[in-house]
Amino acid sequence: SNLIHKYNLDGTLVEEFSIAGVSGLRDLAYDGQYFYGGAAATTIFQMDFTTKTLVSTITSPAATRSIAYDAAQDGFWVNNWDADLILVSRAGANIGTIAGPPSMYGSAYDSWTAGGPYLWVFSGTTGGAGCQVEQMSIATGALTGVSHSVSGDLGATIAGGLFTQPGIVSGFVTIGGLAQGDGASDQLFGYELAAGGGGGTSVDVMGYNIYRDGMLIDYVGADTTEYDDLY
């Protein structure tokens, strides 16, 4: 499908829209300004969800199903099922590899958990086998053994897209995603990952979204120290 859906936290559908030139998105990544995703092929779409436009594309050296933005390296970890994870630069170069991940659908970057940074992978892509989020060390490329069963909480589901984001719940970082129905319904979920999202800033921050009454009105770079809004 080419439809993208936006929901409130209470599950109310806010809007659905499409972006010309984009279809079949599997997973999404966010760099603080734009969203990125692929359709299990070698094109990474760079999208502006505010203007609902395709900004640019990156030609990836690997098919892109799962995708996570690595803020420290300004690149994108991508893979398809159990293929090696490839770190793709904004120019489309392979600048890193993690070999032999489990079969996965989505992934997310974690710079908040002590000992990181980590990738979280949403594994469990076979019907009837359940699904889980698993922590992977970027430094070693190995799973750490830390995991949580999503299907154990939500019922018969398999892996879908995954994200991390601070501030959805004030003071905390959320790891969440879409569990695809495997007998149960498709379900959005979120777990507490770490403290954060309220006050202070990350050394990896690239910029800030400016909101008024819950609506995004602007994006400014990290070097901006003052912002004037006539309202």
Image (cartoon, rainbow, N blue to C red):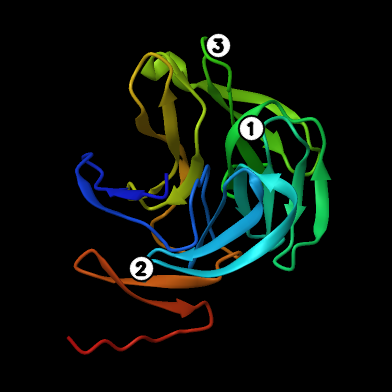
Depth check, mark 1 against mark 3: the one in front is: 3
Of callouts 1 and 2, the N-terminal one: 2
Is residue 9 toward the left or the right of residue 189 in the image? left
Q: Nearer the viewer, residue 7 or 194?
A: 7
Q: Amino acid at mark 1?
A: Gln
Q: Nearer the viewer, residue 212 or 223?
A: 212
Is residue 50 toward the left or the right of residue 212 in the image? right
Q: Quadrant of residue 152?
A: top left
Of callouts 1 and 3, the N-terminal one: 3
Q: Position of residue 186 (x, y in %)?
A: 36, 27
Q: Which residue is mark 2?
A: 50
Q: Is residue 97 shown above or below 20?
A: above
Q: Amino acid at mark 2?
A: Thr
- Quadrant of the image containing the N terminus: top left
Residue 220 in sight from this viewpoint: yes
Q: Which residue is mark 3?
A: 129
The residue drawn where x is 49% and y is 62% is 21
Depth check, mark 1 against mark 2: the one in front is: 2
The residue drawn where x is 49% and y is 64% is 47
Q: How many C-alpha atoms fall within 10 Å of the one at disc 1: few (<14), some, or many (≥20)?
A: many
Q: Is residue 82 shown above or below 193?
A: above
Is residue 100 toward the left or the right of residue 124 in the image? right
Q: Amino acid at mark 3?
A: Ala
Mark 1 and mark 2: Cα distance apart in space: 31 Å
Describe the element under mark 3 as helix, strand or loop: loop
Q: Position of residue 194 (x, y in %)?
A: 48, 41
Q: Which residue is mark 1?
A: 135
Mark 1 and mark 3: Cα distance apart in space: 19 Å
Describe the element under mark 1 as helix, strand or loop: strand
Check the image and name the residue furthest to the top: 128
Q: Position of residue 215 (x, y in %)?
A: 25, 67
Residue 116 in sight from this viewpoint: no
